[in-house]
Amino acid sequence: MPEQKDWRLIKDIQKGKYCFLIGVNNWAIELQKHEFELLYKLLLKLNRQFSELKGGLMDEEFINLEIEQMPWYAELEGTKYKWNLRLIFESSEQTRSFEMYWPIPIAENLFYEIKKMWESMD
């Protein structure tokens, strides 16, 4: 039996407006390409800041890092080795807003898969 993942990341450009799907455990949300791109850029910025800080952290020291880059808000919480991520999206088109929560260890795996997916696109 194949290993069951607790998250999904799907790109289907043929689908039209909402062509990226992110799902964790029992929820999923579809994003437009520009929303996904802004999420990718926010995650890169968050990762840069986290990388700069984690070298100075003790192994079990707790960190809370918040970044707002409209329309996204991100909050990373955990230690230098294990962290979760909470994301809030506030639509500039006033069409929808939502919140995502990526628990440990899904947060780190999903971050790298989003990075890999975006960077592999032409």
Image (spheres, helix red, strand yellow):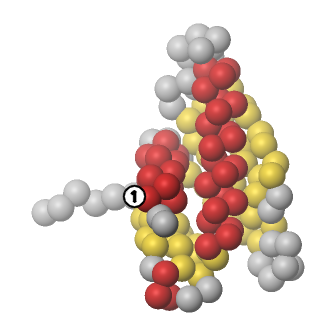
Image-based side of 47 in relation to 81, left or right:
right
- Looking at the rendered structure, the secondary structure element under dot 1 is loop
Q: Nearer the viewer, residue 116 or 121?
A: 121
Residue at 67% in and 21% down: 53
Percent x, y of residue 113: 44, 53
Percent x, y of residue 89: 75, 64
Outermost residue, front direction? 122
Visible residue check, residue 117: no
Number of numbered discs on residues = 1
Question: Residue flagged by tag 1: what amino acid is it?
Answer: Asp
Visible residue check, residue 79: yes
Question: Residue 47 sits in which quadrant?
Answer: top right
Q: Is residue 31 above or below residue 37?
A: below
Percent x, y of residue 39: 66, 58
Image-based side of 116 in relation to 20, left or right:
left
Residue at 73% in and 34% down: 65
Q: Nearer the viewer, residue 85 or 48?
A: 48
Residue at 80% in and 52% down: 69
Residue topped by disc 1 = 6
